[in-house]
Image: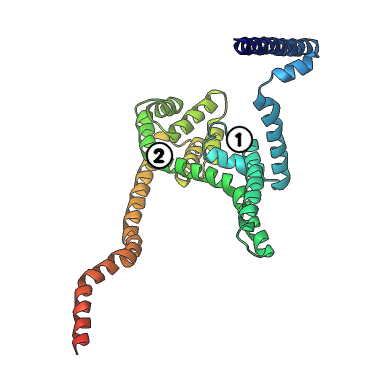
Amino acid sequence: MLLVGAGLLCLAMILGLSLIGVASAERRGVARSVAAIQALDSAPDVLRQELERPFVERVLGPLGDRLINTGRKLARADTAKKLQHRLDIAGNPPAWDVNRLIGLKALGLGISSVLGFLYVLGLGWPFYRVILATVVIAAIGYVLPNVFLYNAGQKREKLMRISLPDAIDLLTVSVEAGLGFDAAVGRVAKNTTGPLSQEFARLLQEMQIGVGRSDAMRAMADRSSLDDLKSFCLAMVQADSLGIPIGRVLRIQSSEMRTKRRQRAEEKAQQVPVRIMIPLVLFILPCLFIVILGPAGIQIANTFKNL
C-alpha cells in the first residue's frame, strides 16, 4: 500500500508539473504573439505595407526584374523589337509580353547551363567536351522561349490561312449587298471565329477610334507574316487610294484566295508519294521480303546442307 501510494503521489506531481509547463509555454507563446502584434503596430507604415504585400510581389517580383535586366544585357539591341513582332504574329497570348520573354530567356540560360554542366560532368567526359556540351545546352535553354513563340505563331497563321477565303467571301457578299466596308468588317468579325476574326475585330476597332482605313490595313498586314493576308491588305490599300470599287477588288481577291488554296491542296497531294517512300523502303519492303523470300531461303539452305 505504501508503494502504491508513493507511486500515485509521484504521478500526481508529474501531472502537476506538466500542467504548469504547458500553461507557462502557452503564456510564453501568447506573450510572443502579443509582442509581434505590438511590434507591427509600432512599425512604420512603409514597413507594415511591405509586410502585408503577397509573397509573389515581395520576392518573385524583384527576382523577375533582375532576370529581365540580365536578359536585356545578354540580348542584342533589336531583340525586343523582334520579340514584339513575333508576339503580334502569335496574337499576343495572355500573360506574354516582351519583358517576360526576356526574363524567361535569361532563366532558361541559367537553369540549363547549371543542370547541363552537372549532368555532363557526371558522364566522365574530358573537360573541354564538358564545356562545349554545357555551352550547347545553355544555348538551347536560351532559345527555347523563341521556339515556343514561333510555334504558336505558325499554328495561328495556319488557322488564318484556312479561314481567309471564307472570310473574304463573306466580306464580298456583305459589301455587294449594300453594307459599308466598316459594317462588312464588323459582320465578318461577328460571324466568324478563330484568330482571323480577332484580326478583323481589331481592324474595326482601329477604324472606329479614328485611324484611317489605309493605315489600319497596313497595320494589319504588319502584324502578320501570312502572304495571302498581306496581299489582301495591299489590294485594299491600293483600291482605297485609287478609288477602285471595293466590291470588284474583293471579288478578285476571293477568287485568287480559293485558287491558291486549291493549289496548296494539290501540292500537298503530290508530296504524298515522296513522303510515303521512306516508310515504304525502311519498314514495309523489308517485311515483304522476309515473308516472301524467307521460306525460299530456308529451303535453299536445307538443300545445300543435305549436299
Q: Give the percent coordinates (x, y) of residue 194.
A: 42, 33
Measured along the vertical axis of the image, is residue 133 above or below residue 302?
above
Q: Residue at x 31, y 64 (%)?
A: 283
- Looking at the image, residue 183 sits to the left or right of residue 93; the answer is left
Give the class, few, some or many, for how many residues have Cα within 10 Å of label 1's Cα (few <14, many ≥20): some
Q: What sort of colour scheme is used for the picture?
A: rainbow
Q: Residue 267, located in which quarter of the rendered image?
A: bottom left
Q: Nearer the viewer, residue 128 or 183?
A: 128
Q: Give the percent coordinates (x, y) of residue 209.
A: 56, 23
Q: Give the percent coordinates (x, y) of residue 254.
A: 37, 41
* Mark 2 residue element: helix
Q: Give the percent coordinates (x, y) of residue 158.
A: 43, 43
Q: Amino acid at mark 2?
A: Leu
Q: Could you tell me which quadrant the C terminus lies in? A: bottom left
- Badge 1 is on which residue? 97
Alpha-carbon span between mark 2 and mark 1: 27 Å
The label number, if any, that marks residue 164 in the structure image: 2
Q: Amino acid at mark 1?
A: Asp
